[in-house]
Image (tube, helix red, strand yellow):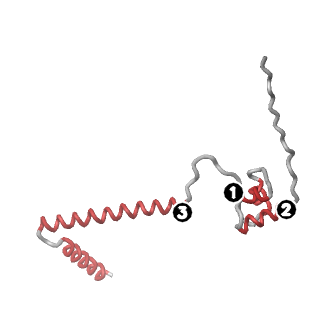
Amino acid sequence: MGQKSTVTIKLSPPRKFSEAFKKQVVREFEKGHLNKDQLMVKYALKGKSAVLNWCRKYGRFAYPKSTSTGRPMKDPQKQRIRELEKKLKQAEDKLVIYDKLIEVTNRQLDEDVIKKIEAKLQESLRKEERLK
């Protein structure tokens, strides 16, 4: 009747690389001529993280210890810039509103409100200077 077929997967034993070879691969990677995938093809490396692990161990630059699969954390500087941009937008909106408010007030009173306010401020400043 039916014969059972078995599939055998031949696993090759892990290869050992010399420290000098690993350092050479890291130097090539850090020079920027080849990326990680190109180095894997060039030297027939099988592990996807071998080059990165070697870079962490022998490299001159800082490499992340692990990659998270979740949502990346926000960069504090970018987050601060966004907050400041939001505050700036709010301040600009307030300015537009205040300008409209002054315009409407000027029309209703048929006077220049800004000039009145400036005059009162100058008068109060003069009084403060006299007191000193």
The image quarter containing residue 63 is: bottom right
Badge 3 marks a residue whose secondary structure is: helix
Image point (77%, 59%), residue name: 42
- How would you rate the neighbour count of disc 2 (Cα within 10 Å): few for under 14, some for 14-19, many for 20 or more? few
Task: Point out the tag, 3 or 1, that comes first from the N-terminus.
Answer: 1
- State how far apart marks 3 and 1 are (Cα): 19 Å
Residue wearing tag 2: 21
Q: In the displayed image of the protein, which residue is found farthest to the top? A: 1
**Residue 77: image tag:** 3
31 over 68 or under it: above or below:
below
Image point (19%, 67%), residue name: 103
- How would you rate the neighbour count of disc 3 (Cα within 10 Å): few for under 14, some for 14-19, many for 20 or more? few
Question: Where residue 122 sits: x, y (%)?
Answer: 25, 79
Residue wearing tag 1: 64
Task: Point out the tag, 2 or 3, that comes first from the N-terminus.
Answer: 2
Q: In the displayed image of the protein, which residue is found farthest to the front? A: 1
Q: Amino acid at mark 2?
A: Phe
- State how far apart marks 1 and 2 are (Cα): 22 Å
Please count the marks in the image: 3
Q: Amino acid at mark 1?
A: Pro
Which mark is in front, 1 or 2?
Answer: 2
Which mark is in front, 2 or 3?
Answer: 2
Question: Where residue 81 sits: x, y (%)?
Answer: 48, 63
Image point (87%, 45%), residue name: 13
Question: Where residue 69 sits: x, y (%)?
Answer: 63, 46
Which mark is in front, 3 or 1?
Answer: 1
Which of the image's four quarters has the N terminus?
top right
